[in-house]
Image: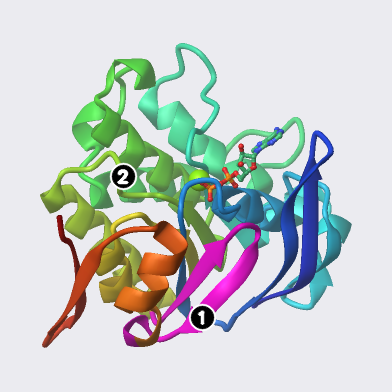
Amino acid sequence: MLAATSVHVSLDGNAILRGVDLAVAEGEWVTIIGPNGAGKSTFLRAVGGFLPYSGSILLSGTETGAHSRRQRARIVASVAQQPVVPPGIRVFDYVLLGRTPYIPLLGRESLQDLSIVEERLHALDLLPFASRRLDTLSGGERQRVYLARALAQSAPLLLLDEPTSALDIGHQQEVLELVDGLRRAHGLTVLATMHDLSLAGEYADRLVLMSDGTVAASGPPSAVLTEELLRSHYRANVRVIDADFGPVVVPVR
Ligand code: ADP
Ligand code: MG
């Protein structure tokens, strides 16, 4: 689904990504972890076609930069860490923006577009907010709206940049379960970034540890969430406990 080879990105003359190799198979869930500033968001933005890069990023076999915006939006849907929101927009209309790649130029949305929006609002507990202004919602409610917009795009690859960081523990679980359910039902491929390491390990097939603009480790959660790797890349003192559902990372004073 996604094959990135030797990806370099420079921003304002600084080398931010310095040769990233990362592949995600169809239907796989890969989560990128790594300290602040490692380049996780930058990588997701390059994959989404929002940044110039050198090297190669293939989406279903075609270079992401070679797709038209409209084509690319049918393949990959992103939830940015800090999405840009049109001022004053209502929740329903914002989620409807996810249908843009299917609405003919100068045309109107179809009944199917409207029913997909309604279905995504329902799935994310957002129907009561449909006619509210997006800027009046709480951080967690807003984060669910961003996800609803991306899911309305019905793209096979979903990029999620810290999708749960503003959510309480109940909504974290609900959102991740919803994404996982869609993945199982529709063969969705997921590339996410997350800061909660235990949670990251619980939902991903594979973790990629990014550090200083390159991939430092990659593999099943138990191979990446090790005390040694976390100590050297996060400079954190942690204990990793083996639970029956996977590794649990606990900070230790
Ligand atoms: P992460 O998501 O892993 O925390 P980012 O990809 O957001 O990291 O950022 C990686 C590095 O790139 C950071 O050091 C950040 O300051 C830098 N950076 C991001 N955007 C720009 C920019 N427009 N110009 C210069 N540096 C940037
Ligand atoms: Mg980031």
Earlier-in-chain disc, 2 versus 1: 2
> Residue 98: percent from the left, percent from the top?
54, 43
Q: Are marks 2 and 1 in contact (CB under 8 Å)?
A: no
The residue stretch that appears in magenta: 205-222
Q: Quadrant of residue 135?
A: top left
Left or right position of 166 against 174: right
Find out whether residue 250 is within the magenta segment. no
Left or right position of 185 against 106: left
Amino acid type, residue under disc 2 in the picture: Ser
Which residue is tagged 1?
218
SS assignment at label 1: strand
Q: Quadrant of residue 4?
A: bottom right
Name the dominant secondary structure of the magenta segment: strand
- Quadrant assignment for the N terminus: bottom right
Find out whether residue 216 is within the magenta segment. yes
Q: Residue at x 82, y 54 (%)?
A: 53
> Residue 36: percent from the left, percent from the top?
47, 47
SS assignment at label 2: loop
Q: Tell me the tag on residue 165.
A: 2
Label 1, residues with CA under 10 Å away: few <14, some 14-19, many ≥20: some
Q: Please tell me which residue lies in front, 121 or 72.
A: 72
Residue 189 in view, yes or no: no
- Quadrant assignment for the C terminus: bottom left
Q: Residue at x 63, y 33 (%)?
A: 108
Q: Residue at x 72, y 44 (%)?
A: 50
How many numbered marks, from 0 up? 2
Label 2, residues with CA under 10 Å away: few <14, some 14-19, many ≥20: some
Q: Quadrant of residue 86?
A: top right
Amino acid type, residue under disc 1 in the picture: Ser
Residue furthest to the top in view is 88
